[in-house]
Amino acid sequence: MAELLIRVGTQDAALIERVLQDNEARPDRVVVDAHVAKAQPRIRAVALAAGIPFIIDPQTHYLQDYQHPADPWASLPFAQGHILTPADLMRPKAAADLAAAVIDYQVEHDATAIVLPYVHIERVDRGWIQVQRALWNASAEHIRKQGLRLPAIAVIALGWRLLDRTTWPEGLARLLRTLKRVAPTEVALAASKVDAGVHPDARLVTMIATIRRIAKLAPVIAWQQGVLGEAAVAGGALGYECGIGWRERCDLPSSMSQHRRPPSGFGPRPVYLSALGRSLPKRYVEAVIANHRLAAELTCTNFSCCPQGRDALLSDMRSHAIRARRGALTRVSAPASPAWRWQQVAADAEARLDLAERVNKYAERAGLNVKVPTETLRAVLTVADNRRRTISRRPAA
Ligand SMILES: [Zn+2]
């Protein structure tokens, strides 16, 4: 069965403790941002007590940008007060020191797997590919020297352009040559902005092709892909990782630039709606709920999950978000045949798109400032439909 990795924040410790006691709702692994491992040790305690793998994302791509000194990530032992360039990281010992600090931090905080340091690579010619290869080599060396026996997860963090097959010889293939030697247990593919642009369906096709290519080397986790997670799994990923209500899409450049500003606290958490396969801002849900028919369609009908029915939409939907994602992922990954998996993704996307369009029509008529994004759903539907047909046309092997 495909794996659901849920990223929890400092405010989710009590929630995750409850959720991990419930066999139907529990995620397969718990992931935290690097600073959360230090700030909220209770999360790792409850994950370890429940026997759930606990993963710390070092988020070393933040080194490629300026971080506000008050940002919690900036206080980590491997953070830097200034922007690091490829030249900085290619200096003697720089990669080795960084790899050691990043790995030791995870071990000190009881991670059950090691996420190797990574950088965001948007172009093949800026020197970041060399940096990434150096970081992987240095990590393998440090793990060997320390005699660590934990599984290793290599994050490949690519801008959407580098998912395209035409860039592979200068990009992905060079990375994979190093990874073949480093032999990580898994690869986490952090593919930025796949759901954006004029042709997100074309970008999604390239992401699926990239997953299939990497999967020849090691199992692939779709990193930070809540909205595209099920499609990634139908396309061959072992599972996907995402947040609860937020952190549903991978956009590393934006996440890097957000950390330039002083931390501003969180707004209301978006509400995950299984009927749409994504979260929406709470004020959208508050506005749309006035329409009883739409409210009924958006409501979770699983009584054991949301016994308050419609009122649940405005209350704490965090455990619903995890349980509903778990359910949808099981549904998509259950069929043994890839064509049937895509069939399920297509059917889900079609129903979600239909509802999203009706919500938008109602919002327009009622003069509400609400617009459910439909581009991603449309892209998933197009790709799933194509994959389903292509695979079923192939003669049986
Ligand atoms: Zn529910």
Image (cartoon, helix red, strand yellow):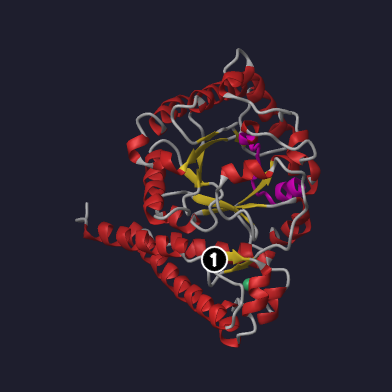
Label 1 sits on residue: 327
Q: Is residue 51 magenta?
A: yes
Q: Residue at position x 42%, y 38% from top? A: 162
Q: Relative to 234, is 71 above or below?
A: above
Q: Relative to 315, is 100 above or below?
A: above
**Where ligand 1 lies, by image quadrant?**
bottom right
* Image quadrant where residue 25 sits: bottom right
Q: Residue at position x 59%, y 83% from top? A: 366
- Residue 235, given in percent of the width and then of the height, sits at 39, 52
Report whether residue 169 is seen.
Answer: yes
Horizontal side of residue 21 vs 199, given as left or right = right
State the residue lying farthest toward the bottom.
292
Count of numbered labels shown in the rendering: 1
Horizontal side of residue 270 vs 118, given as left or right = right
Q: Is residue 3 magenta?
A: no
Ligand 1 near label 1 (Cβ, under 8 Å)? no
- Residue 116, given in percent of the width and then of the height, sits at 59, 32
Report whether residue 337 is seen.
Answer: no
- Which of the two residues, 293 or 53, is positioned nearer the viewer here? 293
State the residue lying farthest toward the left.
395
**Amino acid at pointer 1:** Gly
Q: Residue at position x 42%, y 30% from top? A: 176
Horizontal side of residue 14 vs 374, given as left or right = right
- Residue 51, given in percent of the width and then of the height, sits at 67, 49
Q: Relative to 288, is 114 above or below?
A: above
* Image quadrant where residue 342 sits: bottom left
- Residue 394, given in percent of the width and then of the height, sits at 21, 56
State the residue lying farthest toward the front.
367
- Which of the two residues, 111 or 172, is positioned nearer the viewer here? 172
The range drawn in magenta is 43-61
Query: For mark 1, does the 10 Å Cα neighbourhood hold few (<14), some (14 to 19), or many (20 or more) residues?
Result: some
Helix, strand or loop at mark 1: helix
